[in-house]
Amino acid sequence: MGFEPMYYEETPEEERLTYKLRKFVRRIRQKIKSRIRQGQAFETMTRTALKRLADNPKNKLWFTRLWDFRSFIRLNPKFHVCKQPADFLVCYNGQFIFIECKSSQANRFDPKNVKPHQEQAMLDTERAGGIYWLLIFHRGASPSEHRLFALRPKDWFYLQSHDNEGFKTYTWKQIEEQGKELHRRNGVWDFTPLLISKCDDCSEINEPPDREEDMR
């Protein structure tokens, strides 16, 4: 006895809803892919800037890119992936430095882009005498409008503890006031200000405040 497949014919209203749903899902996927590409582009800029410093024989600098979860998932989707503390590991004159890269083209920066395990890595690294830099890249409408800010853990946690008038996101002016703005030199971001030889003010770093789930 053969199996006869059953067919269901959608009503015009159901067809319209199905089309809208597929269009919505496609838009969300495109947005996610766009954000991933933007993040990868900024990581490439960071690698280029570090390589320029490493290629200078006067600098005793070595760096490597830490594999993220996407790199492991490409190998095997069933991998149980450990969470990395940052994107790059740098050693400069014997000083241990982590660099985490974040980018956004929104009008405000969402602190939830920085994950709890990364915040914990900030605390653990600097309390152990290392250095942790959080790089926040503001992507403008054109390359001339791009801006890059570098924050230490004490700067980042100060932002979270500061009264933000009820908002859960930060303006770029707030990030500029707390962070250190980096600039381009010959078309490449200049990371020289990040190469400090000691961890200062480590004792002043406080635990990150609890986050609320609602966003304004």
Image (cartoon, rainbow, N blue to C red):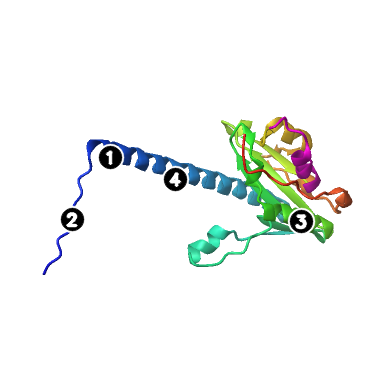
The N terminus sits in image quarter: bottom left
Q: Amino acid at mark 2?
A: Met
Q: Is residue 170 visible?
A: yes
Q: Disc 4 marks which residue?
A: 29
For disc 3, the marked residue is 97
Q: Residue at x 49, y 67 (%)?
A: 78
Which structural element holds mark 2?
loop
> The C terminus lies in which quarter of the figure?
top right
Residue extending farthest to the left is 1
Query: Which x, y percent locates residue 33?
Result: 48, 46
Which numbered mark, 2 or 3, is in the foreground of this view? 2
Contact between labelled residues 3 and 2, with CB atoms less than 8 Å apart: no
* Image position, residue 139 (x, y; %): 60, 36
Gap between marks 2 and 4, in whole Å? 31 Å
Tell me which segment is drawn in magenta: 153-166
- Mark nearest the camera among 3 and 1 is 1
Residue tagged by mark 2? 6
Whichever of labels 2 and 3 marks the residue nearer the N terminus, that label is 2
Q: Is residue 162 magenta?
A: yes
